[in-house]
Image (cartoon, rainbow, N blue to C red):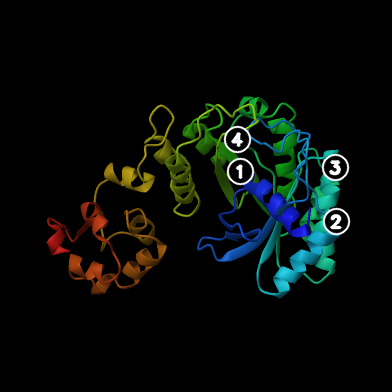
Amino acid sequence: MSLVQKIRKLASSSRFDVVCGSNWDVPIFQSGQMNNFPLLKLLLSNECNFDCKYCNNRCRNKSTSINPKKVAKLTNQLYTNNRICGLFLSSGVYSDPEDVMEDLIYTAKLSREQGFDGYIHLKAMPGCSKDQIERASIIADRLSINIEGPTRSHLSELCSVKDLKIDIERRQRWIDEQDVGQSTQFVVGALDETDKEIINKSVELYEKFDLNRVYFSGFKPLKDTPLESSSGVERHRVGRLYQSDWLLRVYKYQPKELLKITENGMLPNIDPKLEIAKKKRRINIKKASEKQLMRVPGIGPKTAKKIQDKKQEIQSLSDLKSMGVPEKTIPFIELDGEKQKRITDF
């Protein structure tokens, strides 16, 4: 197998670690809020001794791996040619977890030694040592270890060799002690976990370990896995979880506000910001704080700041339109007691 074929194979095998979109001609993934942060994202090996039920890297008969020196060389070539901004490196657990983690650290270290000063995101292996976490944090900008399920029983059902408290949260605590970013990821829909359980666990992790992000990977049944006959997760469910996460992290909503709109533990298939706003009183534009303005559907941080800065200049609801306020805000706002009655008034 040629180097290019290996790279493509190992990039494909890394799909269980969510970043954003991808370009399948080359293993470069578009990350960032605007998909403007390209990463080389791949596994050192897709051979794995773990038995995660959703993953077809488990117990492979035919596996592919790549030499750390080749990864470091490719990373620097792509970076020098302005093709990537960073490296996202993970691996199947093809040997003892500490040995695999050592190979990941060595690969990242080689990349740095060869002049790469871009972003590096390393996966921490369940079972790696605290010393390895400490050394990885010196080289990488972010470390992550996937929690996968919201409870101990969910994770043990997904993978018999991983324990939530010992293998995952202990490493998350070690990462939190370092000067490095941290994220994690849930597999959504593989089992019977609810959105309520995922939201509660996300909040707990943000508070305990000061995470940068929580990611959500929608379950898709794959051939030759124990869950191949299961149904895939509805696409909207993952989207609603991301919207809820955004409200918690950026807009500083309280968890109870999101949990209040769940039914049987599941979020409705509607923008949670909109659903919460339906149950609130209208916002008076001229009296509201910037934080209150951000709670109006259709108004984000930039627009809220613009309204706040020009509040004295706003004389009518139509003035808001020139500030970028969309029509969907109509049912949720008023101006000095004046409520919008018709779309044509806007």
Q: Amino acid at mark 1?
A: Gln
Circles 1 and 3: CB distance less than 8 Å? no
Identity, as a three-letter code, of the amino acid under mark 4: Leu
Q: Which quarter of the figure is the C terminus placed in?
A: bottom left
How many angstroms separate mark 4 from mark 2 (CA)? 32 Å
Tag 2 secondary structure = helix
Figure disc tally: 4
Give coordinates of residue 224: x percent, y percent: 65, 31
Q: Is residue 216 visible?
A: yes
Q: Mark 4 or mark 2: which is in front? A: 4
Query: Circle 2 is placed at which residue position?
Result: 106
SS class of the residue under badge 4? loop
User: Counting residues from the N terminus, which is met first, the one under dot 4 or under dot 2?
Assistant: 2
User: To which residue does mark 1 refer?
Assistant: 185
Residue 267 pos. (x, y %): 41, 36
Residue 49 screen position, x and y as percent: 79, 34
Q: Amino acid at mark 3?
A: Glu
The answer for how far apart the CA atoms under marks 1 and 4 are is 19 Å
Kindly check if marks 2 and 1 are in contact, taking CB atoms under 8 A apart as contact: no
Which numbered disc flags the more N-terminal residue, 1 or 4?
A: 1
Q: Earlier in the sequence, mark 3 or mark 4?
A: 3
Binning the other alpha carbons within 10 Å of mark 4 as few (below 14), some (14 to 19) or many (20 upward) gives: some
Q: Which mark is residue 222?
A: 4
**Which of 21/201 is in front?**
21
Q: Which residue is mark 3?
A: 98
**Marks 2/3: CA distance?**
12 Å
Residue 237 position by quadrant = top left
